[in-house]
Amino acid sequence: MPSTLLRIAVLASGRGSNFAALLAARANGQSPLEFVLVGSDKANAGALQLAKTAGIPTLVLDPRDYAERRDYDFALFERIAASKPDLLVLAGFMRIIDADALTPWVGRMINIHPSLLPKYRGLHTHRRALEAGDSEHGASVHYVTAELDGGPVIAQAALTIEPGDDENTLAARLLPLEHQLLPAVVALIASERLSLAADTIIFDGQVLRKPLRWHQGALIA
């Protein structure tokens, strides 16, 4: 186990339930983490209040203050860089990021996405899985690259779609799995068991050929 804490910055646009899961993981000793910043594009994001309560520095940057999306993204990432994180976690950050702005962060930025990637990149994943008649759905944690939800997938958690499921029930049943999956991946990064080399995920010194699976409370290859 590393002797130093993994410095984490988090970006979130909503209530921050996945961020809360990371906070809980730190509190219960699952991961040696230090949260250096929680940022959002929305001043009323619940994640910001969670961070303030926990004594974590926060940042709000309003996209409406910038003429171009690219300008906003560079300004945002400049402020994130000032906090010197080792890892940037997108935990429900609902913006597409300019490719040039995120390129320096490739290998140091992960995202949690509510589908079994490469299925259903982008929005409305629960609806799309139901409309396609899928038998299972899930969540993925992946390294972020310039391709939308297209970076190398680290790990996935799956659940069976039930006959009576709608978008809301499916989302509600998936969320607890997200709250287990994301901290488990961050714990692997914090313990230096997981990294990205070029476009290849290295896990315990070996090339990861397919995503890790969440099974019975643990990630397995």
Image (spheres, rainbow, N blue to C red):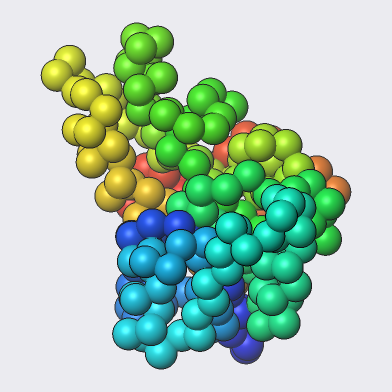
The correct choice, above or below, for 221 with respect to 34 in the image is: above
Q: Position of residue 163 (x, y in %)?
A: 17, 15
For this rendering, which residue is in front, 68 or 182?
A: 68
Which corner quadrant of the image does residue 130 belong to?
top left
- Percent x, y for residue 176? 28, 49
Instruction: Residue 30: name its quadrant.
Output: bottom left
Q: Is residue 73 visible?
A: no
Which residue is pictured at 39% across the width and 34% down the height? 138
Q: Position of residue 154 (x, y in %)?
A: 60, 45
Look at the picture and state if 66 lies above or below 170.
below
Picture quarter with the N terminus:
bottom right
- Depth check: give the residue in front, 90 or 44: 44
* Residue 199 placement (x, y as % from top left): 80, 43
Front residue (pair 119, 65)? 65
**Left or right of 31 on screen, residue 86:** right
Can residue 210 be seen in the rendering of this structure? yes
Q: Is residue 29 left or right of residue 152?
A: left
Residue drawn where x is 27% and y is 28% of the image: 167
Q: Give left or right: position of 65 versus 125.
A: right
The quadrant of the image that shows the C terminus is: top right
Q: Residue at x 39, y 20 (%)?
A: 129
